[in-house]
Image: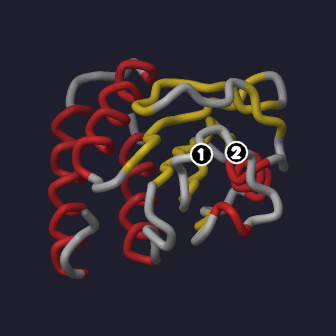
């Protein structure tokens, strides 16, 4: 079930930001923070089939902490939505994964996707990747709040 209204979505994201801030308080370990973060996203966002992170290492993205089904482990920069968002260092929203030319099918249940780059001190750390079982699940509200969410993560 998707959010009933834009207001419900905004309310959920406001709560998500507060919960994330509380989880980050006093914890500086990136992997621990990403693990809890992916669990939180998976719990709060409806119809999520993947909520997780790919970390930039040795000129590629490597699967990091996540919630969901088995996923791709290595993604080259520029390849797939994650690689494209990382290379461009900009958030990408894919309304329908079946129609996206550069989509890598890691899970057939994923019908839409949003990827937010994680940048700290002008360095690419990785990406936040969210996949949803519903076509058109992500919009500008998601972009705005998920960019805030990643900024909060990168402050630790």
User: Count of labels shown?
Assistant: 2
Q: Secondary structure at mark 1?
A: loop
Q: Is residue 140 left or right of residue 33?
A: right
Specify the label residue 105 is tagged with. 2
Q: Is residue 102 left or right of residue 128?
A: right
Image quadrant in which you'd find residue 70? top right
Query: Which quarter shows the C terminus?
Result: top left
Residue 73 % position (x, y): 68, 24
Q: How is the image coloured?
A: secondary structure
- For the residue pair 44 and 146, the one nearer the viewer reads as 44
Residue 29 % position (x, y): 39, 18
Image quadrant in which you'd find residue 66? top left
Q: Which residue is mark 1?
A: 108
Q: Residue furthest front?
A: 108
Q: Secondary structure at mark 2?
A: loop
Q: Marks 2 and 1: CB-CB under 8 Å? A: yes
Residue 64 % position (x, y): 55, 25
Query: Which quarter shows the N terminus?
Result: bottom left
- For the residue pair 100 and 109, the one nearer the viewer reads as 109
Identified at 16% across, 38% down, the residue is 22
């Amino acid at each position: 079930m998707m959010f009933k209204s834009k207001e419900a979505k905004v309310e959920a994201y406001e709560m998500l930001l507060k919960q994330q801030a509380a989880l980050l308080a006093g914890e500086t370990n990136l992997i621990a923070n990403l693990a809890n973060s992916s669990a939180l996203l998976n719990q709060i966002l409806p119809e999520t089939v993947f909520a997780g992170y790919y970390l930039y290492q040795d000129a590629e993205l490597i699967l990091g902490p996540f919630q969901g089904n088995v996923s791709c482990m290595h993604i080259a920069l520029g390849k797939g939505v994650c690689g494209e968002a990382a290379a461009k260092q900009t958030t990408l929203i894919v309304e329908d994964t079946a129609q996206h030319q550069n989509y890598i099918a890691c899970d057939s249940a994923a019908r839409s996707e949003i990827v937010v780059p994680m940048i700290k001190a002008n360095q690419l750390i990785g990406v936040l990747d969210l996949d949803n079982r519903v076509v058109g699940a992500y919009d500008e509200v998601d972009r705005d709040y998920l960019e805030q969410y990643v900024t909060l993560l990168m402050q630790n």
